């Protein structure tokens, strides 16, 4: 905790020291800050050439436990719109926004989505991973479109046209995902991931995911959690354990070894890949995940 406070103080100080020169040049594109890479990609599809999007948490980054940098505060301070996921994903954001003295409106991309409620260690919390269902991503896109129109009304027609085209693409992607997953038999639809990031995916596409870590990566799985999952895999004959791009693969590999389950490929849960990886966009991410699931589970 003490460490984090120091980081924030440092951010506030460095902002104060280096404010004015950067602001003298007005950017031609609307500066937008998104908290993590998936949200940034959705925003780029809606904003097109009118906006420049910066993602605070980068490719393969973990948005649950992110440590903000002074650069992030500067970017927030210069933003005209701040896009956030909400539902408890960005626990570090409120302090960062205060420290940055940002004044841009905050657009909550999950507004209007019915959140999944999770019980964890006796407490009820919200599951933030709503983007893993494509119908939910469509709601994100509508919220981003409306947020952009509110701060840049001159671009309204462009934002509406871009959003409509991208929504049509997402509707096609949803069909593609359902068709591909139809090849996986019902008894092979219960699987293991490292953290509980696929609850909305499971609801939308009829899967059940079990994870040793909860909906946040903040608390590590205990030896008891891991032992329980190994027992579940054996009792229910769960076919595969999947890795995740934002998680250390060691635990998943150990669980697979000790339970006899197959190790599936890496699912992209909370972040995209760098441009040269298998999931540089939201659409690529969903395709990658479907490819990994069908490769390990389809018969
Ligand atoms: Zn997560």
Image (cartoon, helix red, strand yellow):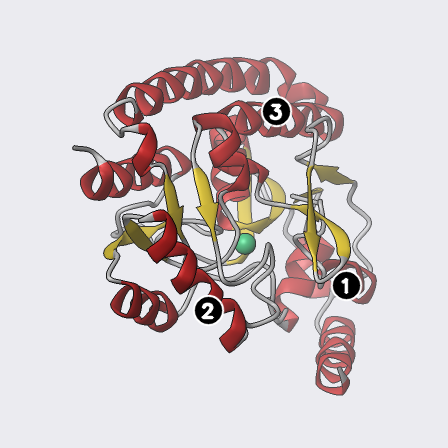
| Residue for point 61% across, 24% down | 139
Question: Looking at the image, is 30 positioned above or below residue 16?
Answer: above
Left/right placement of residue 44 relative to residue 4 reads left
Number of other residues with Cα within 10 Å of mark 1, as a class: few under 14, some 14 to 19, many 20 or more: many
Which label's residue is closer to the chain start, 1 or 2? 1
| Residue for point 61% across, 70% down | 219
Q: Evaluate if marks 1 and 3 touch, with contact meaning CB atoms under 8 Å apart.
A: no
| Image mark for residue 100 | 1
Question: Looking at the image, is 5 positioned above or below residue 221?
Answer: below
Quadrant for residue 93, please give it.
Answer: bottom right
Name the residue beneath numbered marker 3: 139
- In what element is the residue under mark 1? helix
Left/right placement of residue 150 relative to residue 193 reads right
Label 1, label 2: how far apart the Cα atoms are:
40 Å
Q: Tell me residue 6's x, y (percent).
A: 75, 84
Left/right placement of residue 118 relative to residue 233 reads right
Mark yes or no: residue 285 visible. Answer: yes
Please tell me in which quarter of the rendered image ligand 1 is found: bottom right
Say which of 154 and 273 sits in front: 273
Q: Nearer the viewer, mark 2 or mark 3?
A: 2
Q: Nearer the viewer, mark 1 or mark 2?
A: 2
Say which of 271 and 20 sits in front: 271
| Residue for point 54% across, 29% down | 137
């Amino acid at each position: 905790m003490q460490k984090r406070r120091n980081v924030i103080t440092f951010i506030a100080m460095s902002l104060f020291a280096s404010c004015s020169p950067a602001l003298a040049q007005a950017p031609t594109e609307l500066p937008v800050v998104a908290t993590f890479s998936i949200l940034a990609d959705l925003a780029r599809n809606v904003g097109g050439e009118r906006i420049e999007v910066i993602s605070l948490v980068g490719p393969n980054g973990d948005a649950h436990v992110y440590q903000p940098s002074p650069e992030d505060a500067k970017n927030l301070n210069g933003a005209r719109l701040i896009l956030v996921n909400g539902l408890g994903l960005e626990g570090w954001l409120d302090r960062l926004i205060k420290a940055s003295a940002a004044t841009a409106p905050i657009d909550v991309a999950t507004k209007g989505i019915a959140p999944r409620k999770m019980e964890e260690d006796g407490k009820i919390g919200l599951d933030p991973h709503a983007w893993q269902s494509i119908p939910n991503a469509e709601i994100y896109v509508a919220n981003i479109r409306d947020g952009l129109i509110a701060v840049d009304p001159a671009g309204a027609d462009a934002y509406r046209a871009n959003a409509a085209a991208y929504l049509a693409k997402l509707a096609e992607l949803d069909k593609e995902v359902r068709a591909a997953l139809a090849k996986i038999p019902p008894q092979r639809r219960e699987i293991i991931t490292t953290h509980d990031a696929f609850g909305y995916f499971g609801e939308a596409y009829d899967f059940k995911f079990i994870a040793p870590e909860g909906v946040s990566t903040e608390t590590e799985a205990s030896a008891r959690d891991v032992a329980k999952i190994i027992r579940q895999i054996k009792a229910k004959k769960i076919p595969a354990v999947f890795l995740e791009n934002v998680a250390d693969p060691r635990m998943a590999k150990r669980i697979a070894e000790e339970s006899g389950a197959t190790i599936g490929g890496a699912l992209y849960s909370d972040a995209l890949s760098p441009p040269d990886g298998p999931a540089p966009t939201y659409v690529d991410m969903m395709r990658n995940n479907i490819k990994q699931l069908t490769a390990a589970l389809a018969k």
